[in-house]
């Protein structure tokens, strides 16, 4: 198992033992506290270049699946996870404010996400032809109360675009990388992505170096001529 998988397994086991200690008094202490954890590698950062992004969006727009293009644009624009996007219901969409409310997130907390630009335009267009037999934005054909499975059209689009080593979750990394390269702070990126701490967004820090250099340069020019 990879170090990341081992750490997740150890965390799950540690939680079980902690419950045994605190809730049921089956144990005097949690023995997992004495177990060393392997060092995890630095988080993956795979984001689309301008050419790759253009190729992928073109392939998605040409897909016979009408949901693929708006879903991918939404992921690139907001950094939402696939599960968060596919679970969206129309009650979660405020087109007037340009706002999405995520009721089901990985950390279990409700989160608001700004909706703007192309993504807002596509959701507005999608709303004009929405199905009335389901609350979902992206329902399945045969089972409208379940989200459509986009894996097959997604894999086909990635292949058609000629992308190598690119997964749907990398759209989230792409959104975060674009935010960093456009001057967003790590706190701002964490807020958009829904991370509670900065640990998960530290991987994007190097992408904002040019922005930091510009901030320092402007300060020096203002204060020292």
Image (spheres, rainbow, N blue to C red):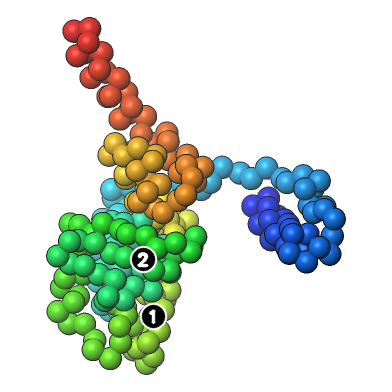
121 vs 199, left or right, is: left
Work out whether residue 122 can be spotted: no
Q: Percent from the top left, x then y, of residue 211?
A: 30, 30
Q: Quadrant of residue 102?
A: bottom left
Whether residue 181 is situated above or below residue 28 in the rendered picture: above
Q: Residues within 10 Å of mark 2 (few under 14, many from 20)?
A: many
Whether residue 64 is situated above or below residue 52 in the rendered picture: below
Q: Which residue is mark 2?
A: 102
Which type of secondary structure does the marked residue at label 1 adopt?
A: loop
Q: Percent from the top left, x then y, of residue 149?
A: 41, 79
Whether residue 118 is situated above or below residue 214 in the rendered picture: below
Task: Work out how far the residue at label 2 is from the one at label 1, CA to CA, in angstroms.
Answer: 15 Å
User: Looking at this view, is 56 or 198 the one in front?
Assistant: 198
Residue at 42% over, 40% down: 204
**The C terminus appears in which quarter of the rendering?**
top left
The answer to whether marks 2 and 1 mark residues whose Cβ atoms lie closer than 8 Å is no
Residue 147 tag number: 1
Work out whether residue 206 can be spotted: yes
Residue at 35% over, 51% down: 192
**The N terminus appears in which quarter of the rendering?**
bottom right
Which type of secondary structure does the marked residue at label 2 adopt?
A: strand
Residue at 30% over, 87% down: 134
Q: Quadrant of residue 20?
A: bottom right
Whether residue 4 is situated above or below residue 16 in the rendered picture: above
Residue at 78% over, 59% down: 21
Q: Percent from the top left, x then y, of residue 120?
A: 19, 63
């Amino acid at each position: 198992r990879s170090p990341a998988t081992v750490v997740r397994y150890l965390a799950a086991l540690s939680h079980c033992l902690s419950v045994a200690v605190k809730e049921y008094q089956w144990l005097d202490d949690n023995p997992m506290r004495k177990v060393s954890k392997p060092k995890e590698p630095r988080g993956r950062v795979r984001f689309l270049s301008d050419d790759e992004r253009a190729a992928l969006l073109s392939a998605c727009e040409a897909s016979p699946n009408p949901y693929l293009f708006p879903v991918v644009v939404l992921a690139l624009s907001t950094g939402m996870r696939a599960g968060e996007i596919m679970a969206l219901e129309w009650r979660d969409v405020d087109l007037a404010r340009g706002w999405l409310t995520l009721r089901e997130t990985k950390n279990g907390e409700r989160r608001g996400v700004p909706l703007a630009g192309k993504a807002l335009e596509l959701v507005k267009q999608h709303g004009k032809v929405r199905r009335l037999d389901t609350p979902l934005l992206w329902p399945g054909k045969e089972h409208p109360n379940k989200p459509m499975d986009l894996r097959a059209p997604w894999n086909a689009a990635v292949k058609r675009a000629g992308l190598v080593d690119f997964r749907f979750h990398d759209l989230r990394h792409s959104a975060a990388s674009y935010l960093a390269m456009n001057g967003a702070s790590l706190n701002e990126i964490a807020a958009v992505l829904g991370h509670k701490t900065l640990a998960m967004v530290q991987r994007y820090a190097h992408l904002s170096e040019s922005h930091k250099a510009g901030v320092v340069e402007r300060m020096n020019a203002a204060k020292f001529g």
